Amino acid sequence: MGLTIGICKVSWPRSTKTARIVCILLFSLILHGEHPLSKESVTVTFVDPEWSHDLTEHTVVADDRLKDFTQETGIGVKHLPTPETTLDQLDLVRKLLRQGSSTPDVSGVDVIWPGVLSEELMDLKPYLATELSSINADVAASYTVKGRLAAVPYHSDIGVLFYRRDLLRRYGYAAPPRTWDELEQMAAKIQKGERARGQKDFWGFLWPGAAGEGLTCNAQEWQVSEGGGRIIEADGTISVNNPDAIRSWQRAAHWIGWISPPFVTSLQEWDAINDFYHRGTSAFYRGWARTYLLSVRDIPSVRDTIAITNIPAGTNAQAATLGGFGLGLSRSSRHSAEAQQLIRFLIHREIEIEEARADYESRNWPELYDPTAILRVKRSSAETGQQPVSGVVARPSTVAGEKYEEVSRAYIQAVRSVLLGQSRAAEAAASLERELVRITGFKTGPPSRNRVPKQKSLGKVSGTSPAAASTSASTHDSLR
Amino acid sequence: MRQATTSPVLYRFNIGRHLALCFALLIGIMVACDGVLLWQLREVRSQVELLKGVDGELIEVLRVHGELFSFYERLSHAARSEDQDQLIAVSEGLRSGVLDETQRTEAAFRHLPSAVRVDETVFPTVETIENTLLSHLDAIGALAASGEWADVRSRTDDQVQRLEYLSSQLVKDVARDVEEQRTQAALNIEIVERRIILTAIVTGFVTLFTAGFFGWATALRIIELRGEARAEREQAEEALRQAQADLTRASRVSGMGELTASLAHEVNQPIAAAVMNANTCLRWLSREQPDLEEARAAAARIVQDGRRAGEIVNRVRLLFKKGTLQRELVDPNEIVREMTLLLHSEATQFAVFVRTKLAADIPRVMGDRVQLQQVLMNLMMNSIDAMKDVDGTHELMIESRRSEDGQVLISVSDTGVGLPPEQADKIFNAFFTTKTHGTGMGLRISRSIVESHGGRLWAADNSPRGARFCFTLPANGATCDPVVSGDRTEAADGPHDNNPVV
């Protein structure tokens, strides 16, 4: 054809234009379909610890939000499944991030891991300045490593005591226990009564005693409430080897076989709540507020029989562990702009929902009493501004930083050895102290007891906003 | 010429700017087509690799899923047995199995070709599943150790089964991905196919058209060029022939002019003899007793002389006459004798002694008498010229004999200046002459006449001196060919022939 063109051109110059058109047509025909791919929409991968490890095995709350997000922005979100325990989650996320893998873009970072993962996460402070102003500064501080915000607080959580409302009523208790002593009494009484009623495998108090981060939270609550310190104090003093802590461990060890089953040391959090919810063979369970909030919404029967209250106080104070996770953005993310959008969206949505809930739902649905509400309060008012939220205890992850994992594992091992009767509490504490010194290089010292003041009004969280106080009160009201 | 009447395409076919452009365009198209083909081959290869990788991905995920299923089966079986030892044994086996699996999966995913667009979540998901399995094994092992079989079962049923659900979801996702990529690859390959076919068609068409058009055009052009060449050659031959004929005649005429003197002398001799015989006859008749016998004899001699004179005149006239070529059987010896006679006075004038040595058994040849006479006269005049200024014996020897191959060979030898050294061949070229008044045409014409009779003419040195010109003629005109058709030359050559002169 080209020749025709050439010749035509030679013979009849007028046909040059035709020739050119034919030529172009021909080649466009040949090259046709070079770009058959449509533009692919960006998909952000998200590790949401609540998504794949939903303890209550019910629909995942966050999914609706993600749908909204995709609708609003056109950015797809894909979940990565996460392992069950936070230590396993850490292993996975750390492995993926250190590999420089493009997934996940957004990771749920447990409040204790920013120190471990900060190198792999972007500093979000410059991007989320406005959002940070509506987030509790203390909580935000626990996600801050060396001045960099490794993750933005998303779902904060605190330890709570689950109790069987029906059983308490049956045995004449108007209110849930406020101290460990009360708990022990109630648990023993209910256990005895229930066993007499034919439930041979009934136990009073269930808690996750398997080797996992859950045990660290539990044990820290025991020892802080007894004035045993926070393992490593905020100033870097290793305070774990003290009589109060040892006493608190001994008390817990005493529970096993008395009000707690012997297999409690094999229970992961999932097993424990599974037992508590579905087998109904225990009266009390130490769990997390969010677990309850999520399951109440999804399992109506839970609302009728199960309620939560604050972790019982010890001789020194009432203490609930700060939990939850924030959202971190991977340094090796290929869609960091979209991932930021997702983070911002989720945080905004969270703030809106929590405000609505605090104002309305909690009044009308006392069961929705949300102890985590205290964490959302901004530290802006003069009366609460100068001191941290009381009763809520953070694990020493900030001070231990990247060593926290080792610290926690050592602590778990020590506590478990006491619980299992493998070693005496004093010896375990002493050897743990040596181990922590080896790991962190910090000095040892006494716990700073003044840090968590003793609660006069048990069951309330001091220094909280009126809203939080009222939700607290309404919980107790509902028991009557 | 004829181009004016052929198509304008052909007319412009002579390589010019346009044609060069056209060629460049063609080459460009072919190169582009080749490029497209190569590119498409690469495309196909990458698609094949992609398909291979995609299948690898699917197989890997399916394998993981299958492993997980068997994992679940075994674990669940062990959990139902409520036998702690069995469960521990099983979970130990499963643990190492999961670790192996993890490594295999990692390796498999690492070796996927880069072209495969693996869903970014697949590998982390598989990894999570495998890691979670290990945690479950720990948890289940711990629960089993404390004899809490209900928890073992619920963990097995809920958590492990959930992983299975996850992995089946993964299989579904990957299968969908793979299907998409397969479809895409199939689509790509289809496009490639179409491109290749189109390219092949275009290339084929261009090739065919090029070959066809240029073949046709070139053939036409060649035919035309051949016609042109033949016409030109014919024209040139015609012109040459004309020139040659004109020249021959001119040289003959001018040669005749020079011959006139000797011819007059030649004619005068019989006339003088006739006059003398007439006187004798008168004397015999004027006696008292007229001797009639003697008178008759004298009168007879007069008649003879008159005839001789007439013959001479007739021959001269013949030489001047313009006429057509006449082929007849000619006796070469007779021609030699005639020319000897004709040039007798010329030879005598320069004291040249002419000798002939004629073989009696010479066959007659088919040819034009006058032309052959001209050749001979030409050669003899050349020899006489060559001997004019040479001291010593002037001897002109004409010899006729049969050559070895049966042809008639006539040679003309002289004792003149001889051939110019190193130029023996050039003397036959047109316009080559060594004489001051020669035209350089004599020997050229002679050779062409001889060759037109199917013979050869050549020159050689004579011993002890002088030159020798020989020519052959086919006997009986057997090989005489009819090449020369338009030669109107009949007369003998003039004296201006090129003859080597020192």
Image: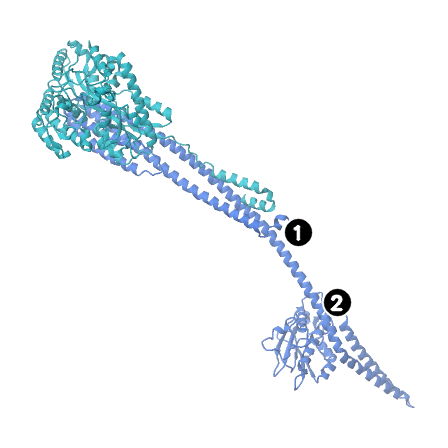
Chain colours: A cyan, B blue
Q: Quadrant of the N terminus of chain B?
A: bottom right
Residue A187 falls in which quadrant of the image?
A: top left
Residues packed near mark 2 inside 10 Å, few (<14), some (14 to 19) or many (20 plus)? few
Residue type at the position of mark 1? Ala
Residue B57 seen by the camera: yes
Q: Residue at x 37, y 26 (%)?
A: A73
| SS class, disc 1 | helix
Residue A120: percent from the left, percent from the top? 26, 34
Up/down of B109 relative to A142, above or below: below
Residue type at the position of mark 2? Thr
Up/down of A393 relative to B350, above or below: above
Q: CA distance from mark 2 to mark 1?
A: 39 Å
Residue A331: percent from the left, percent from the top? 29, 34
| SS class, disc 2 | loop
Q: Nearer the viewer, mark 2 or mark 1?
A: 1
- In the picture of the structure, the residue carrying the numbered disc 2 is B324
Residue B43: percent from the left, percent from the top? 41, 40
Residues packed near mark 1 inside 10 Å, few (<14), some (14 to 19) or many (20 plus)? few
Residue furthest to the front: A382
Up/down of B127 relative to A4, above or below: above
**For residue A475, side relative to residue B262 (left or right):** left
The residue nearer to you, when weighing A213 against B263, is A213
Up/down of A213 relative to A458, above or below: below
Dot 1 falls on which chain? B
- In the picture of the structure, the residue carrying the numbered disc 1 is B4
The residue nearer to you, when weighing B404 against A315, is A315
**For residue A247, side relative to residue A147 (left or right):** left
